């Protein structure tokens, strides 16, 4: 195929999904790497004196075509993959890793960057330019530019291997998820399940050409089963299957991958002069050191554990009284928690779901964004899409300026990994006087519509949609000059603030009234249900906090110490969980081998950031509450100080500019009901 025939190598603004063939990706990426190398060579071999413009700015814009093509490819690999795409990912990841190393280990390029960096205080730089210069210099220094040749060679090998391992890890989990099904033919085994869950399972069985009902490990199927199925043995079977993904000592097993990843990360950190991978990562985070993270987690643990233990005892008593359960197991957790919540608050998801039709929730989050930030969302139908489920919207401001293109992809399918995330097909930046606007995507796995009902969301799915849309706003409202500082390109423990703060509106009557309307009658959600949502907001908050903290502690246990002595993944995990454990250990299950956040995504040494950002979001939302949740002045400050600024300044400086002070951790503890 000639390059001119490959649509990905033509200049494009909107991603041309309708014209891309799977075979286009590899040659396009190979050609884009060659083009990017020429751009890098032009900078590093320039005979001109190095300046901010010809070295630092030029470097930030170099490889733009490669960035566009790879963003399309890796987003497809997450949201609509297949065997061909996965094979291509394994083939191109080493090429991209090598290219990245060729930049950071390029001596003549680093020499030019260093020359500009060393004269930075004599240069008349804007705040954003100064931050970009520091980021570029650190990017080289922190990734091997000062290493000897033999160490540079080893670094290259490590990075290539890590990129392959992360892909394999994720492919194994997707394969495990797709492989399992619970096929039920006896209707009595469905006792307790709501009609919506049974109808969806019947639809899945029909699609697979089978009688009866099929439940899978995809969240919209798995969670209702665990929450409502009276059959304890079947709940156990499902829970064991879910918890054993990547833990079967077969070709899809991830135990060796986990050990290889953590040991290579540790070796890489040592090679670069850092004590551990966590020390390397956290140098560029608000938390700064593993010691600070550990202190933060332990402080929250101290406050949350007593509450969690009391809540667990309450749950044990309830299960004993209801069903004579002597020992609560992990597969009982969601079931009895849901039953207890119903008893305490007369509230359950099936009562709420009719008020949360997906289309209404989407319209609701758009309306809230309009009231806060003067945005207007228009669904468009001529935009190429990678799957028929995807919806596309153009976003405008109050002056009808085009702000962003927004993709929404909300339902599970075989080619999509689990979970929910925000991503971009094109980032925002300003070049040659043109403000290039971003193309942002939210990808989730929500309950599908059935033959008789539209997609009706659980309240947890509603908060997930708001969470990802908060990330989306961070991308859409970006307004910086340089691509690498734009939108969500911020410190990892700051990136969750825009997403987590938006979840707060889901609990506010004034916001719920905008979109929580019964899908059949159009009736607005009754105030009595809103009151119950508010009252139930802190239900088992101690247990939920303990669970989140356990994940952060597990993450640090893998990355904040030398892992070379770890030979048994399960035993290591049990030791890490010891101080946060409520339920008996399940020998057949292991979380680490499917902990995609830290072994496939970017959260290694960073899982604590969810809780860290909760401190920020609780404090920030209290500012809205003090002035009105739709107060334009506060919303404009949040947009101008945080959402539009990306990584152009230290996060705490940005936060204090918005809030007028540093965040108060007590706001989180009070909201969670952990302190009065």
Image (cartoon, rainbow, N blue to C red):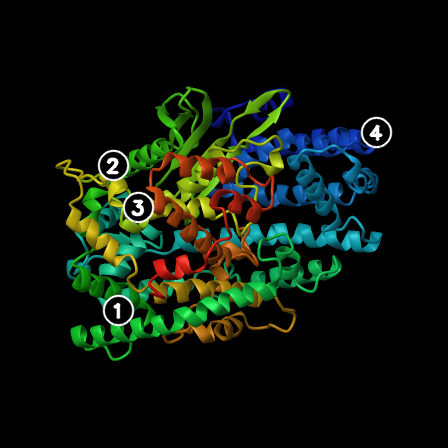
Q: Earlier in the sequence, mark 2 or mark 1?
A: 1
Q: Quadrant of residue 561?
A: bottom right
Q: Which residue, as the protein is rendered here, is positioned at the far left?
A: 521
For marks 3 and 4 on the same chain, the one whose residue lies earlier in the sequence:
4
In the rendering, which numbered label is found on residue 363? none
Q: CA distance from mark 2 to mark 3?
A: 10 Å
Residue 259 position in % (x across, y down): 59, 65
Decide: few, some or many residues near mark 2? Use Cα within 10 Å; few <14, some 14-19, many ≥20. some
Please tell me which of labels 2 and 4 falls first in the chain. Answer: 4
What residue lies at 36% left-to-right and 43% top-to-bottom? Answer: 466
Residue under label 3: 506
Is disc 2 placed on a helix, strand or loop?
helix
Q: For this rendering, which residue is in front, 326 or 635?
A: 635
Name the spot of residue 282 as percent of width and height, x first.
62, 57
Q: Which residue is mark 4?
A: 46
Left or right, 320 with respect to 374, comes to: left
SS assignment at label 1: helix
Secondary structure at badge 3 equals: helix
The residue depicted at 61 percent of the width and 33 percent of the height is: 483
Q: Nearer the viewer, mark 2 or mark 1?
A: 2
Mark 1: few/some/many CA within 10 Å (<14, 14-19, 20+) = few
Q: Nearer the viewer, mark 2 or mark 4?
A: 2
State the residue position of label 1.
233
Residue 249 in view: no
Q: Tell me if mark 3 has few (under 14), some (14-19) or many (20+) residues whose alpha carbon lies within 10 angstroms of its own.
A: many
Q: Which residue is mark 2?
A: 514
């Amino acid at each position: 195929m000639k390059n001119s025939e490959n649509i990905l190598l033509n200049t494009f603004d909107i991603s041309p999904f309708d014209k891309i063939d799977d075979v286009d990706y590899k040659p396009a990426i190979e050609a884009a790497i060659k083009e990017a190398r020429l751009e890098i060579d032009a900078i590093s071999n320039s005979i001109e004196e190095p300046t901010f413009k010809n070295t630092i700015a030029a470097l930030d814009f170099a490889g733009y075509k490669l960035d566009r093509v790879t963003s399309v490819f890796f987003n497809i690999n997450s949201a609509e993959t297949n065997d061909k795409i996965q094979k291509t990912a394994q083939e191109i990841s080493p090429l991209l890793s090598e290219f990245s190393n060729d930049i950071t280990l390029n001596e003549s390029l680093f020499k030019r960057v260093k020359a500009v960096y060393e004269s930075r205080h004599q240069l008349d730089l804007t705040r954003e330019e100064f931050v970009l210069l520091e980021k570029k210099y650190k990017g080289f220094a922190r990734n091997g530019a000062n290493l000897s040749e033999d160490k540079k060679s080893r670094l290259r090998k490590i990075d290539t291997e890590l990129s392959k391992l992360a892909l394999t890890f994720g492919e194994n989990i997707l394969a495990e998820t797709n492989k399992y099904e619970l096929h039920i033919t006896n209707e009595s085994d469905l006792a307790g399940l709501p009609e919506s869950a049974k109808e969806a399972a019947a639809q899945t069985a029909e699609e697979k050409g089978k009688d009866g009902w099929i439940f899978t490990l995809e969240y919209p199927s798995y969670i209702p089963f665990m929450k409502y199925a009276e059959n304890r043995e079947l709940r156990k079977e499902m829970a064991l299957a879910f918890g054993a993904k990547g833990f079967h000592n077969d070709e899809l097993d991830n135990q060796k991958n986990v050990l290889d990843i953590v040991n290579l990360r540790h070796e890489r950190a040592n090679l670069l002069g850092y004590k551990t991978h966590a020390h390397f990562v956290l140098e560029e985070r608000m938390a700064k050191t593993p010691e600070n993270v550990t202190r933060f987690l332990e402080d929250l643990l101290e406050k949350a554990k007593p509450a969690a233990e009391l809540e667990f005892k309450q749950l044990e008593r309830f299960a004993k009284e209801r069903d004579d359960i002597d020992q609560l197991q992990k597969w009982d957790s969601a079931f009895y928690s849901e039953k207890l919540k119903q008893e305490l608050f007369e509230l359950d998801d099936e009562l709420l779901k009719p008020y949360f039709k997906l289309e209404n929730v989407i319209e609701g989050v758009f309306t809230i964004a309009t009231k806060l930030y003067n945005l207007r969302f228009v669904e468009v139908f001529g935009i190429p899409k990678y799957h028929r489920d995807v919806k596309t919207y153009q976003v405008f401001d109050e002056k009808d300026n085009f702000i962003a293109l927004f993709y929404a992809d909300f339902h599970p399918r075989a080619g999509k990994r689990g979970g929910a995330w925000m991503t971009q097909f094109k980032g925002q930046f300003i070049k040659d006087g043109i403000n290039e606007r971003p193309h942002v995507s939210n990808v989730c796995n929500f309950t599908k519509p059935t033959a008789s009902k539209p997609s009706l969301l659980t309240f947890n799915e509603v908060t997930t949609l708001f969470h990802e849309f908060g990330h989306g706003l961070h991308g859409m409202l970006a307004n910086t000059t340089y691509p690498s500082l734009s939108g969500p390109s911020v410190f990892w423990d700051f990136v969750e603030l825009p997403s987590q703060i938006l979840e707060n509106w889901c609990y506010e009557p004034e916001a719920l009234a905008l979109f929580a309307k019964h899908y059949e009658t159009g009736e607005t959600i009754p105030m009595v249900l809103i009151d119950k949502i508010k009252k139930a907001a802190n239900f088992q908050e101690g247990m939920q906090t303990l669970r989140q903290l356990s994940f952060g502690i597990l993450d640090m246990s893998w990355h904040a110490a030398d892992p070379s002595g770890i030979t048994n993944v399960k035993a290591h995990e049990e030791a890490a969980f010891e101080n946060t454990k409520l339920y008996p250990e399940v020998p057949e299950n292991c979380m680490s081998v499917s902990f995609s956040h830290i072994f496939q995504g970017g959260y290694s040494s960073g899982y604590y950031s969810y809780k860290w950002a909760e401190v920020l979001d609780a404090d920030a939302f209290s500012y809205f509450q003090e002035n009105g949740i739709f107060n334009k002045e506060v919303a404009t400050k949040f947009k101008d100080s945080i959402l539009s600024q990306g990584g152009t300044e230290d996060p705490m400086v940005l936060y204090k500019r918005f809030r007028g002070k540093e965040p108060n951790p007590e706001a989180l503890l009070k909201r969670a009901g952990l302190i009065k």
